[in-house]
Image (spheres, rainbow, N blue to C red):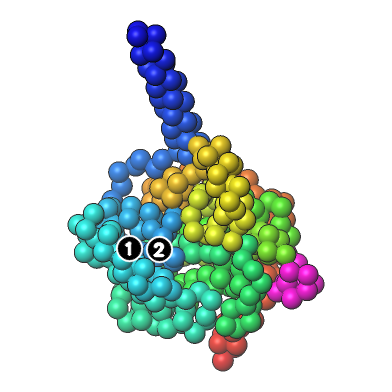
Amino acid sequence: MAKSIRVPILWASVIGTVAGSAILIKDYCGGKRFDNPVMVENKTTIITGANTGIGKETARELAKRRAKVIMACRDMSRCEQARKEIVLETKNKYVYCRLCDLSSQESIRKFVDEFKRENDNLHILINNAGVMRCPQSKTKEGIEMQLGVNHMGHFLLTNLLLDMLKKSAPSRIINLSSIAHMRATINKDDLNYDKNYDGSKAYSQSKLANILFTIELAKRLQGTGVTVNAVHPGLVETEITRHMSFFNSYISSIILKPLIWMFIKNPVQGAQTTIYAALEPVLEKVSGKYFSNCAESRTSLVAQDDNLAKWLWAVSEKWTKLEEERSV
């Protein structure tokens, strides 16, 4: 009798130890947390893709810190659902949903026009939204979707808001990039991947473009009081992984996911470096850098190519029609 009782207790102890260890490992692998209690009351912020994942957790944290939060999203129904949740939790009523589809330059321009009619300042712009390894598709302007949303859309949005950011200085721009940029090149011969489309390479190219844009913009903003930095959030399980077979296959969900669960960040953990770059007082004058795990990190050598950054900037101006507007 005593022996039969001891066996279940032993197994319960083993299971509890394993589960507890897994939770501790996951917490450790989740990286540093931004625990500076700095508040941002009376600061206006824009977060793209703020209705889910990292963007939603970033919006939640900024709302807790009393910021005015503009959630720039393409799905207004899901945005409103997330907004209500954040308002109820944080008791901050200054959280708003605004339509901004980064795959449409017309939508981006309408968003900026509306924002400028409704607001006098912009202190923090977080270019968070993105798509990853999607099937070959194009934006409304015919740009490869990952380059169009992850880079071109944010390039246009940021440039159209620079006057507000300069007016509100000190202000900050944060671009979400990825460690995937380390294996990327800019495909000058086929930037739009019209030939031999490879979703992984196109994604990595768009993340490299984020950093090239960040470094070039930092140079152009010197002396304005506006800083711009890029961040790598880590490997985070959010909706951005919906096109990755690894995360969505039957075998993965049954066998592999449980094994690597402890090494993948949740959205709260994934948002920490973004929040750090947006709020850390020490970074007020730091610009043109790349951060990972709440610390400055190194980029690839390609990301430091000034000539490539200038080339990409010129192409981006052309593809977003900013070049035409500035010549008028």
Side of 261 where 1 appears, left or right: left
- Nearest the viewer among 191 and 136 is 136
Q: Are marks 1 and 2 in contact (CB under 8 Å)?
A: yes
Vertical placement of 34 versus 66: above or below?
above
Q: Categorize mark 1 by other alpha carbons within 10 Å: few (<14), some (14-19), many (20+).
A: many
The spot of residue 1 in percent (x, y) is: 35, 9
Residue range of the region highlighted in magenta in the rendering: 186-197
Residue under the image location 43 percent in, 56 percent down: 53
On residue 82, the disc is: 1
Q: Amino acid at mark 2?
A: Ala
| Residue 272 in sight from this viewpoint | no
**Residue 79 image point, x, y percent:** 35, 68
Q: Nearer the viewer, residue 290 or 17?
A: 17
Observer-side mark, 1 or 2, equals: 1
Label at residue 66:
none
Q: State the residue at coordinates (54%, 73%).
A: 153
Tag 2 residue: 50
Find residue 291 and report its horizontal and vertical position in percent: 54, 48
- The structure residue drawn at horizontal position 38% and vertical position 55%, both measured from the top left corner, is 58
Q: Secondary structure at mark 1?
A: helix
Rendered-image quadrant of the C terminus = bottom right
